[in-house]
Image: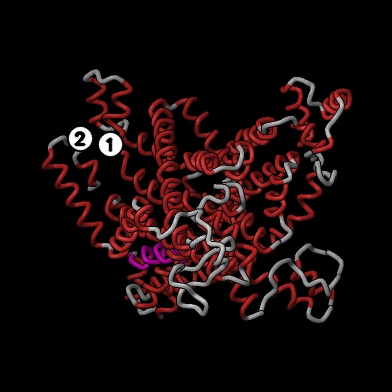
Amino acid sequence: MFFYLLRRLGLLIPTFFGVTIAAFSFIRLLPGDPVLLMAGERGLTPERHAALMRQFGFDRPLWQQFLDYVGGILQGDLGNSLVTKNPVLQEFFALFPATLELSLAAIVFASVLGVTAGVIAAVRRGSWFDQTVMGTALVGYSMPIFWWGLLLIILFSGILGWTPVSGRMSLMYFFPEVTGFMLIDSLLSGQDGAFISALSHLILPTIVLGTIPLAVVARQTRSAMLEVLGEDYVRTARAKGLAPARIIGIHALRNALVPVITTIGLQVGVLLGGAILTETIFSWPGIGKWMVDSIFRRDYPAVQGGLLLIAAIVMTVNLLVDLLYGLVNPKIRHTGG
Amino acid sequence: MSDITSAEPIDSRDAGRLALLAEFWRYFSENRGAVIGLCFFSLIVLLAVFADLIAPYGPTEQFRDAFLAPPVWQEGGDWRFILGTDAVGRDMLSRLIYGSRFSLFVGVIVVSLSLFVGIIIGMIAGYAGGWLDTAVMRVMDIILAFPSLLLALALVAILGPSLINAMIAIAIVQQPHYVRLTRAAVMGEKSKDYVTAARVAGVRPLRLMFITILPNCLSPLIVQAALSFSTAILDAAALGFLGMGAQPPTPEWGTMLAEAREFILRAWWVVTFPGVAILLTVLAINLMGDGLRDALDPKLRRS
């Protein structure tokens, strides 16, 4: 296991280095002069332009700029946003809890519902329930989630008036940020209705973001369960006369969950991509919306830093999923060293 | 190995081909969903091809007497505009019909582009092995480390927002999947006897790669192509929705949704129909993709 971990880390470092180069090249590939873009409509005198080029280090050779950039990353410095002038890292982590809360809610929603539906569908294979679940899953998998979000807003916010249209919290409430998770912070604040407000803001974005992972998890759980239910040891357990609930819940599910956990873990990239659309629709103040806004504002340091951090998160989670897979799957644990 | 394609590595006889095709169709048609998907997809292809004949009006034709006219079955509806009109008085139905052209175009171009590039890169990496393989796979890992929509969005920001650039960006984001699949298949095939025999017989590397080995690696690639056809349509619509894909007044479905956003609480039809069109098209393709997978890849066949 230790060597497996080392090998995985060994693979990760060159990839991360590559990601750094990619993010660095990104800002240089963009059309236009970064200093002119910063100046915007006002324009610059040639002297001021040269001074700014020097100040930001754009006049130096590319390799030197790259070394500075890497040096900065190692010290946790990703540059400053052109728009707010704040450090990119600080902006990112100020908004990150919002995305994390939404993503966690979506993954819990997708896992709980998806595993349950998948298991029941597999056990009652061929029944109307199975066919409905699989049909719905295929529709969910094909869903343009930005449109799905708009539909839910029309229905639940427009017609029924049950949920708010956008944001994380009603303006009526104000409380200090402790964890950055509205659900927890609103509870800690002890204000009446604050938690309900946070929950009602969270529910639609969660459904929208969780839809595709839900479909994937349900399909994967069903096929993993079907495979396991056909194995000899399940037949043996049946022959021994064990209660069906025990066979399904303990013997089968435990093994079927191995590929499902991997699937859930691999949804992180999907979630962060989906967060871009979901946060835009619901004006959710997270990193997805921040990235889109930064791209539109041509805030290159923010885009560059954001890409780097998001890639780092995806890679870290993928590594953790692999390790978890090694832990729950004895085959890998033994042969993988 | 009862893989249909590798059972008879290269068979130039017509009879053999027909038999393979018949077997493929037998498995494919067993899947009811796949056949429904195929029918619906054919319908969309027909709509796209004959849009000029079928659509009642041009996609950008404005009717100044009918802004946001509701669909015909709703109060105030007009038989001239069966699915209603949008905020500047354009017929929804006509725009949706013309829009099918863009979605299919996106799918075809993105899949061809990423398939073509992916096969070449994957073939070379898998066949050559060694440092070249390692280097190529690291680059693919780097691309895959970014969420695909985010990377596509960033690439479009570099290239400039337009439908063509959106397609290029999506193709770049998708091709690592083809590289990986091709490479894995090639590595599995290249040590087999028929390849060794061909090499000993003096077949040159290029011919060996693309004529001898490639036909036996196609099954997973075809399945992936079907699945990424639908992903390409979804991503292009998402980019259009974010304002980074096709630009107004193009009747691209995602772009139409973006234009309709401000009317969501006033005119449900301008928001609902483009989304339904995207959903049904993608669903049809995914149904077909499932059928293709069942028919082409016995190992993945759903139990």
- Residue B271 visible at all: no
Q: Residue furthest left?
A: B15
Q: Which mark is residue B215?
A: 1
- Which residue appears at 82% of the width and 41% of the height? A80
Depicted A21 relative to depicted A307: above or below: above
Q: For this rendering, which residue is in front, B150 or B99?
A: B99
Residue A154, given in percent of the width and then of the height, sits at 60, 72
Question: Residue A222 colored magenta?
Answer: yes
Disc 1 element: helix
Point 43% across, 58% down: residue:
B57
Residue A295 spot, x, y in % from top left: 69, 45
Which region of the structure is painted magenta? A216-230
Where residue B84 appears, as percent x and y from the top left, is 50, 68
**Is most of the magenta stretch helix, strand or loop?**
helix
**Figure quadrant of residue A199:** bottom right
For residue A238, above or below residue A220: below
Q: Is residue B230 left or right of residue B88?
A: left
The tag on residue B10 is 2
Do the residues bearing badges 1 and 2 touch, measured as CB atoms within 8 Å? yes
Mark sitting on residue A108: none
Q: CA distance from mark 1 to mark 2?
A: 8 Å
Point out residue A33 in the picture as x, y percentages from the top left corner. 74, 30
Residue B215 part of the magenta segment: no
Comes first in the chain, label 1 or label 2: 2
Q: Is residue A28 visible?
A: yes
Q: In the rendered view, would you say B161 is above or below B253?
A: above
